Amino acid sequence: MAFQKAVKGTALIGGGAIATVFGLSQFSQYRNKHGAFAPVQAAEAVTVPIKSDFPTREEQVLALRTAGEFDVLVIGGGATGCGCALDAVTRGLKTALLERDDFSSGTSSRSTKLIHGGVRYLQKAIMKLDFEQYKMVKEALEERANLLEIAPHLSAPLPIMLPVYKWWQLPYYWLGIKLYDMVAGSQCLKSSYVLSKSRALELFPMLRKDELVGAIVYYDGQHNDARMNLAIALTAARYGATTANYTEVLRLLKRTDPASGKERVCGVRCRDVLTGQEFDVQAKCVINATGPFTDSVRKMDDEEVPNICQPSAGVHIVMPGYYSPDNMGLLDPATSDGRVIFFLPWEKMTIAGTTDSPTDVTSHPIPTEEDINFILNEVRNYLSVDVEVRRGDVLAAWSGIRPLVTDPNSKDTQSISRNHVVTISESGLVTIAGGKWTTYRAMAKDTIDAAVQAHDLKAGSSKTIGLQLQGAEDWSPTLYIRLVQDYGLESEVAQHLAATYGDKAFEVAKIAQVTGKRWPIVGKRLVSEFPYIEAEVIYGIKEYARTAVDMISRRTRLAFLNVQAAEEALPRIVDIMAKELNWSEQKKKEEFEAAKRFLYYEMGYKVKSDQLADSSEISLVPSDIERYKKRFHMFDKDKKGFITILDVQRVLESISVQIAENTLHDILNEVDLNKNGQVELNEFLQV
């Protein structure tokens, strides 16, 4: 009874606020309901023909060198840069895009994997009566609906639970979530609802029971961020954009405008990172969409320009799937230091994050032990005491750099904007900075609108609303069944391929190798516990992958799911890529070492081994420690900081000793004190 009274009482507590937001939303809701066919009309208005396939990387680089002057040249292959390229090319503009690393190699692959408006931003908008913040949430919710529509194979709605532990919080949070639904209007994914304590525990049995009052469930979107970014890039390429990864901009080219006498940006000098060759690319308009590296490109234009980027590091960790239900996320709305933590199922694992702390701009951000432990402690606060949250259960960890900006056009240049900012320098360089993953399309639209106006380009309005991305056209939720029936793939592998490549999954299935087994007929896995198959490496090369890191982190997501599994898959991945790309033995070794460094530093190996070594008390004299360390390193030849079953098998083979694999698993399980599938140095010394 008290539970029902609390919820009903909310109507009285928050009536005024609801009325305010309701008024703000009326026009948007009317427009959405009466303009339901707008997305279809925008997509159908594209007159640029789309190719059945995209060119090879070599053809793209050749086009950069020989195609003459481009209308638009975009620097940066993240979500915003690729969005700009797609927006420009579908307006009929001759478009090029350069990325010095791989598509989505930076922040765009290291997100929370949510497509959302931002519940906390709406809270701030209402509490501070900040209309700009409200507009940002409204725009993000509109873009959320569009993104779920144009790439349904890569995205889906996700229910997220907000547990409530104090009675007074129930009406407060219920009001906030209902306002979130209301701002979304007709594009609300599904109406939020209140759960009793017993029902909340039924849906999220890992939840802490003590003092739990109930819970509120609301809906946002979730996606595979790196694959979504790649889909945008590949779609732009199919529409005719000349896109090239591993092509670094060295400097901006300028010429004097005869009419004004001022210098104007007219292209770039760039270098093919893979071959070392340098060449110029001419363009009427150059767009800087480099995220955290915004200021470095702006300083190529003007060394005296003040910085506008305020980089912030966000760390995430991945834990086993049993930490969360298969289809229910969790939101901690008020952590111990006032931040927000999400706890979400993703790719059959569990993501927890994120942190928010100032950082330096770097191409290789590294997660810190302090941030990992902060997230683990917050997770412990919300999970049942029956669930032991262990440091050893962190299977991967990464840090992404948010490119928060101060608006140079604002009077208050110290205030950090959560929205995006488009600026145009005196020499004509267009810069897009800030924003969030969900609003990449709106950011791209605003950027190309500004570029068209500033450079007098001949182009119409944006046509990307409702424009389907690579793989979406003939995708359906049951497509994977055809893959099983037509090709003899495992059901889990078929579901993965359909959810990763959409209607292009058949192209991957066609090149899948025969297993030699009764079932599955085709599809050799790269590693037994994940559905990634060898054919994806070959197809990944077609999708412009050129390094082993590209393959383990962005074409597949192994590095983000389990660094140990990624390391085990590396030898086979390198072998396949070497055969396809004609690598020498030296090149194979370099790729293998580079990928291991990536896993060790950027995906959480190092902090884990450091923490274990520093925190353990070993009752051995120094001479014994050194002796046993040498024995440990005999097994750990790769200097990973731990021993796996593969390491043990390798040593046993070298001394011609054979032990059954099941027996080896039992032995290692006894030594593996934190039960994470690997034996660290401190565990070895303790035993």
Image: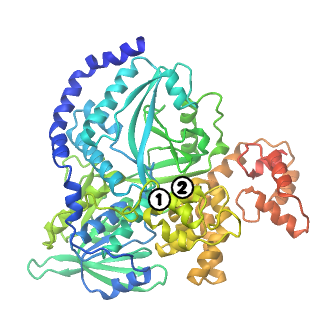
Is there any visible trace of residue 112 in the rendered image? yes
Percent from the top left, x then y, of residue 413? Answer: 24, 49
Residue type at the position of mark 1: Leu
Could you tell me residue 336's position as x and y percent? 48, 31
Which quarter of the figure is the N terminus placed in? top left
Residue that numbered label 1 is attached to: 479
Residue 654 in percent (x, y) is at 86, 70
Q: Residue at x 55, y 67 (%)?
A: 551
Q: In this view, does 279 lie to the left or right of 492?
A: left
Picture quadrant where residue 150 is located:
bottom left
- Looking at the rendered image, the quarter that the C terminus falls into is top right
Q: Where is residue 663 in the image (x, y as percent from the top left)?
A: 86, 53
Which residue position holds label 2? 366
In the rendered image, the vertical position of residue 481 relative to residue 656, given as above or below = above
Residue density around tag 2, few if under 14, some if 14–19, many if 20 or more, within 10 Å:
many
Residue 507: assigned label: none
**Residue placed at 48% from the left, 84% from the top?**
275
Residue 308 visible to the viewer? no
Lower sequence index among marks 1 and 2 = 2
Q: Nearer the viewer, residue 610 or 545?
A: 545
The alpha-carbon separation of the residues under discs 1 and 2 comes to 38 Å
In the rendered view, does 79 fall on the left or right side of 255? right
Q: Nearer the viewer, residue 630 or 558?
A: 558
Label 2 sits on a secondary structure element that is loop
Q: Residue at x 39, y 54 (%)?
A: 152
